[in-house]
Image: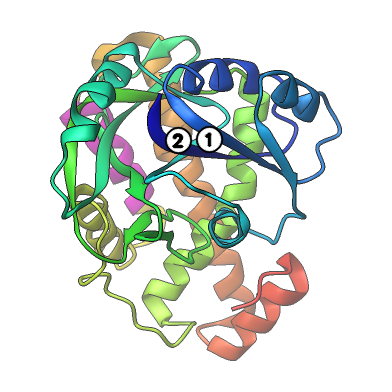
């Protein structure tokens, strides 16, 4: 087994947790499932597969929950892998880990993987693939960014290297669940865009000095440019970019559904939320923050 501990955050993931744990049990020394009081069989399945299950109430976002785990779990391995319950590593990546991880230079504290999306049973090869994410890092050398959306692992020291092979984001729920999830995401994404535009938090963050993956940093900078574009036009332009220029149109009907829902419908819903907030509050920062607290229980 590799000198790796896996941390998986869960809530009602019985549809995914067995697949995920059977996958990581092939290479990881320890597996921690940090659950927030699931009401289905998630905990029962996790324990039956040897995972260490810890219950912790949901603090409001993934970053806080993951950082709580980093501070409170007894982790004795050199490396930590962050994985969601609906994710798993391809066999080629597991083989690559076994081959390369023990031989990495001492100053390498993070490893970047390619993420492929499996949607409606099909690999979305075009549009946004590959998404490069830093998911493996040395214990004590990384934390999760404190963000409402689009949070990444940030290295505190050292450098990251890229591995060649993929892990998969493969959710097994239906389209209704997918759409409902994105409705919930929309307000947080809207707040993120408003923060970029109006500096609601007072941080005026540029992300230029953060030790996240180069692709993640590039994506963050593009998001800053996106936030300056006209409402609703930008969501349509983003869809066209992914569907035509990035050739998602070649992925057939499923490719259209994926790109339309995630690239246009969702982004239009986000813009509608931004429009709604501005219609009520204008660009008054304090009014917006009060509105977010009163209507969405989001504190900035």
- Residue 29 in view here: yes
Front in this rendered view, residue 107 or 193: 107
Q: Is residue 204 magenta?
A: no
Q: Find numbered disc 1 in the image and state the secondary structure of the residue it sits on.
A: strand
For this rendering, which residue is in front, 105 or 178? 105
Residue 22 is situated, as x and y percent measured from the top left of the image, at 55, 15
Whether residue 248 can be seen here: no
**Label 2 vs 1, first from the N-terminus:** 1
Residue labelled with disc 2: 262
Task: Say which mark, if any, is on residue 84.
Answer: 1
Of discs 2 and 1, which sits in the foreground? 1
Characterize the magenta stretch by its predominant secondary structure.
Answer: helix
**Which residue range is magenta in the image?**
234-246
Give the residue drawn at x 31%, y 66%: 156
Q: How is the image coloured?
A: rainbow
Using residue 31 as the reference point, say whether residue 83 is left or right of it: left
């Amino acid at each position: 087994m590799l000198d790796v501990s896996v941390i998986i955050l869960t809530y009602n993931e019985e549809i995914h947790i067995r697949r995920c744990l059977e996958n990581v049990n092939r290479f990881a020394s320890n597996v921690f499932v940090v659950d927030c009081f699931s009401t289905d069989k998630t905990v029962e399945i996790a324990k039956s597969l040897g995972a260490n299950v810890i219950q912790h109430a949901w603090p409001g976002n993934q970053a806080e929950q993951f950082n709580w785990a980093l501070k409170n779990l007894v982790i004795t391995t050199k490396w930590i892998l962050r994985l969601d319950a609906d994710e798993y590593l391809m066999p080629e990546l597991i083989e690559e880990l076994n081959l390369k991880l023990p031989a990495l230079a001492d100053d390498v504290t993070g490893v970047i993987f390619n993420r492929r999306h499996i949607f409606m049973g099909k690999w979305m090869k075009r549009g946004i693939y590959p998404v490069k994410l830093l998911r493996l890092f040395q214990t004590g050398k990384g934390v999760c960014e404190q963000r409402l959306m689009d949070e990444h692992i940030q290295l505190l020291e050292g450098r990251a290297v890229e591995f060649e092979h993929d892990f998969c984001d493969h959710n097994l729920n239906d389209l209704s669940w997918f759409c409902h999830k994105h409705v919930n995401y929309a307000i947080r994404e809207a707040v993120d865009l408003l923060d970029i535009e109006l500096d609601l938090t007072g941080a005026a963050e540029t992300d230029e000095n953060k030790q996240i993956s180069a692709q993640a940093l590039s994506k963050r900078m593009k998001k800053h440019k996106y936030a300056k574009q006209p409402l609703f036009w930008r969501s349509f332009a983003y869809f066209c970019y992914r569907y035509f220029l990035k050739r998602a149109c070649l992925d057939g009907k499923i490719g259209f559904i994926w790109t339309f829902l995630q690239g246009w419908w969702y982004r239009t819903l986000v813009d509608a939320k931004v429009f709604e907030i501005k219609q009520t509050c204008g660009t008054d920062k304090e009014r917006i923050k009060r509105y977010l607290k009163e209507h969405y229980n989001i504190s900035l």
